[in-house]
Amino acid sequence: DSGVTQTPKHLITATGQRVTLRCSPRSGDLSVYWYQQSLDQGLQFLIQYYNGEERAKGNILERFSAQQFPDLHSELNLSSLELGDSALYFCASSVEQLAVPPYEQYFGPGTRLTVT
Amino acid sequence: GQNIDQPTEMTATEGAIVQINCTYQTSGFNGLFWYQQHAGEAPTFLSYNVLDGLEEKGRFSSFLSRSKGYSYLLLKELQMKDSASYLCAVKGYSGGGADGLTFGKGTHLIIQP
């Protein structure tokens, strides 16, 4: 158990719908990262938040957005869903701070999203 | 941008040693990580290199050569439970600060009795 929690574990929805995935980082971790893993693309970095502020953006679509709340939990919002958005969505957290060497990221169990 | 290459699949024998190679091209480098991932589960951290050389951690070792854009993960005394995907990941660094991890597509390691 990494200490990172994600809900829900599974989500099945229809094309065109909107869903929200939730992540709670390990106690004390200020950085939260979101990743998407599909069979053909592998694990892709979407976005990072640090202490409530967006820090880095990867291959995140405009239909997707995220935020980190004052209690440090994070939500990833996926809208206008398409079949191709079906994937495993992982959240990871780390103690990472600015201008210091990077630390390992601890991954949550993931949310499996199926768009039908 | 980042580009990471690693073999798609490898097979090894229980009790033996296996080396999984990773080459990368990056516009900024702030460390290289190795993760293990069993099918349908979360990646788990194995090792981290930011300076050239070998890092040893029990049965697992990782090597980095920044000038060659090359790393390897060495697994010794292989066990059946080591059958998994091994992901090489590079942490970039852009002008605005540290980036997320860029992952290779993973090496699926099959351990045979």
Image (cartoon, helix red, strand yellow):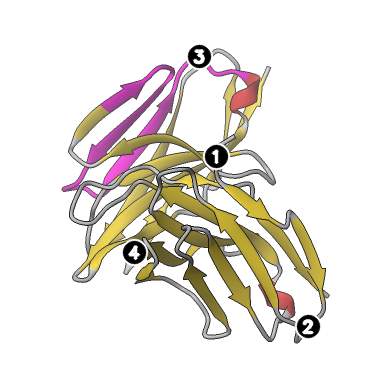
Tell me where residue B95 appears, x and y as whole percent. 18, 70
Residue stretch in magenta:
B55-79
Q: Is residue A95 above or below residue B93?
A: above
Q: Which mark is residue A3?
A: 1
The quadrant where residue A48 appears: bottom left
Judging depth in this view, the residue of B73 and A111 nearest the camera is A111
User: What kind of element bears circle 2?
Assistant: loop
Q: Chain of mark 2?
A: A
- Distance (Cα) linking label 1 and label 4: 29 Å
Judging depth in this view, the residue of A1 and B101 nearest the camera is A1
Q: Chain of mark 4?
A: B
Q: Quadrant of the N terminus of chain B?
A: bottom left
Judging depth in this view, the residue of B86 and A44 nearest the camera is A44
According to the picture, the residue beneath numbered tag 2 turns out to be A15
Please indicate whether residue A64 sits to the left or right of residue A48 in the image: right
Please indicate whether residue A90 sits to the left or right of residue A85 in the image: left
- Distance (Cα) linking label 2 and label 3: 48 Å
- Distance (Cα) linking label 1 and label 3: 29 Å
- Distance (Cα) linking label 1 and label 2: 32 Å
- The answer to whether residue A97 is seen in the rendering is yes
Does label 2 lie on the same chain as label 4?
no
According to the picture, the residue beneath numbered tag 3 turns out to be B77
